[in-house]
Image (cartoon, helix red, strand yellow):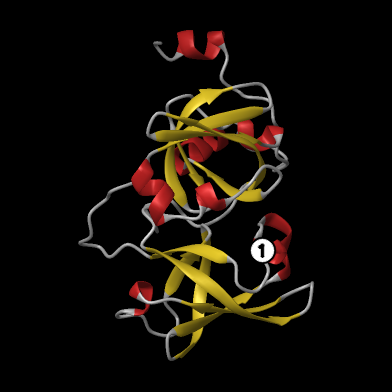
C-alpha cells in the first residue's frame, strides 16, 4: 500500500524488452535506502516489484497488462518518474490509500497558473470519472491530490508549489497521458452496491432500491 506522497523523481535509464512486456532500469536515490529485491515501489503510481539493484538504479518487470493500462510504455529513456516506496506499518499516513493498481489513463487538457498554484485539467474515460467525487481524493501518476472540480468528461486539481517541485506533474504538457487511480474505498462501495446475480454473472444494476431501504429500516 502507498499514500501518494512522492519521495523523489527518478529517471528511466533503460528499457529492456519489447512492446508486449519488458523491464525498466530506473535511476533513484532516496527510495533505494533499505530496499531489497522483492520490495514494492510505485513508479508513476504503478506498483512494481524490484527485481534487481545495481549501484544507484533498480530494475522492475513490466507485464503486458501494465503497458495496456498505464503510461509506462509511452515514456522514453530519460523521462522522469514519480517514485514512492510501500508505506511501512509504522509510517505516517500523509496522503490517502493508494494501491498502485491503475484504473486507467487520462489526458492533460491544460495547465493554468493562478496565484501560487497551477490548475491542471484532465480528461478521463467514463468508467474512471464515475468514481471521482468532488473534493475527494485521486492519484495522478501516483500523486495524492484533491479533486477541485468535476465536469462531464474531465476533472481539475490545483497543484501547490511544493507538489509541483517534488513531482513530474507540472513538467507535463497538454496531450500527455497520466495514470489515474480512483479512491479504493469508493471502488469497494460501488462493488458492494452492484453485487453478483444468482447465476454469478456481474450486473451493473444495483439491488439497492427505495423498497429495499424501507424494508431494512432506512
Residue 159, given in percent of the width and then of the height, sits at: 43, 38
Which residue occupies 71% across, 62% down?
Answer: 74
Q: Is residue 69 left or right of residue 172?
A: right
Residue lying farthest to the bottom in this orientation:
54
- The quadrant in which residue 150 appears is top right
Nearer the observer, 27 or 89: 27
The number of numbered badges drawn on the structure is 1
Visible in this render: residue 164?
yes
Callout 1 environment at 10 Å: few (<14), some (14 to 19), or many (20+)? some
In this rendering, the answer to whether 196 lies above or below 43 is above
Residue indicated by mark 1: 66
Which residue occupies 46% across, 55% down?
Answer: 99
Visible in this render: residue 4?
no
Which residue occupies 66% across, 57% down?
Answer: 70
Residue 91, given in percent of the width and then of the height, sits at: 23, 60
Question: Regarding mark 1 in the picture, which secondary structure is present there?
Answer: helix
Nearer the observer, 33 or 27: 27
Residue lying farthest to the right in this orientation:
19
Q: Quadrant of the N terminus?
A: bottom left
Q: Is residue 193 left or right of residue 147?
A: right
Residue 156, given in percent of the width and then of the height, sits at: 54, 30
In this rendering, the answer to whether 98 lies above or below 40 is above
Q: Quadrant of the C terminus?
A: top left
Residue 186, given in percent of the width and then of the height, sits at: 48, 35
- The quadrant in which residue 210 appears is top right
Amino acid at each position: 500500500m502507498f499514500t501518494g506522497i512522492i519521495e523523489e523523481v527518478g529517471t528511466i535509464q533503460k528499457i529492456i524488452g519489447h512492446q508486449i512486456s519488458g523491464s525498466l532500469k530506473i535511476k533513484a536515490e532516496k527510495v533505494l535506502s533499505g530496499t531489497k529485491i522483492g520490495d514494492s515501489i510505485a513508479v508513476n503510481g504503478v506498483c512494481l516489484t524490484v527485481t534487481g539493484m545495481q549501484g544507484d538504479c533498480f530494475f522492475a518487470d513490466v507485464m503486458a497488462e501494465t503497458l495496456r493500462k498505464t503510461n509506462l510504455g509511452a515514456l522514453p529513456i530519460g523521462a522522469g518518474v514519480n517514485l514512492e516506496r510501500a508505506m511501512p506499518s509504522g509510517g505516517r499516513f500523509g496522503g490517502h490509500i493508494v494501491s498502485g493498481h491503475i484504473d486507467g489513463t487520462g489526458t492533460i487538457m491544460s495547465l493554468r497558473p493562478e496565484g501560487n498554484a497551477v490548475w491542471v485539467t484532465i480528461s478521463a474515460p467514463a468508467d474512471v470519472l464515475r468514481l471521482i467525487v468532488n473534493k475527494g481524493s485521486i492519484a495522478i501518476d501516483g500523486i495524492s491530490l484533491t479533486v477541485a472540480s468535476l465536469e462531464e468528461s474531465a476533472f481539475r486539481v490545483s497543484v501547490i508549489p511544493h507538489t509541483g517541485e517534488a513531482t513530474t506533474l507540472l513538467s507535463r504538457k497538454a496531450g500527455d497521458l497520466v495514470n489515474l487511480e480512483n479512491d479504493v474505498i469508493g471502488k469497494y462501495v460501488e462493488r458492494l452496491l452492484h453485487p453478483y446475480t444468482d447465476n454469478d454473472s456481474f450486473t451493473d444494476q444495483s439491488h439497492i432500491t427505495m423498497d429495499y431501504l424501507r424494508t431494512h429500516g432506512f
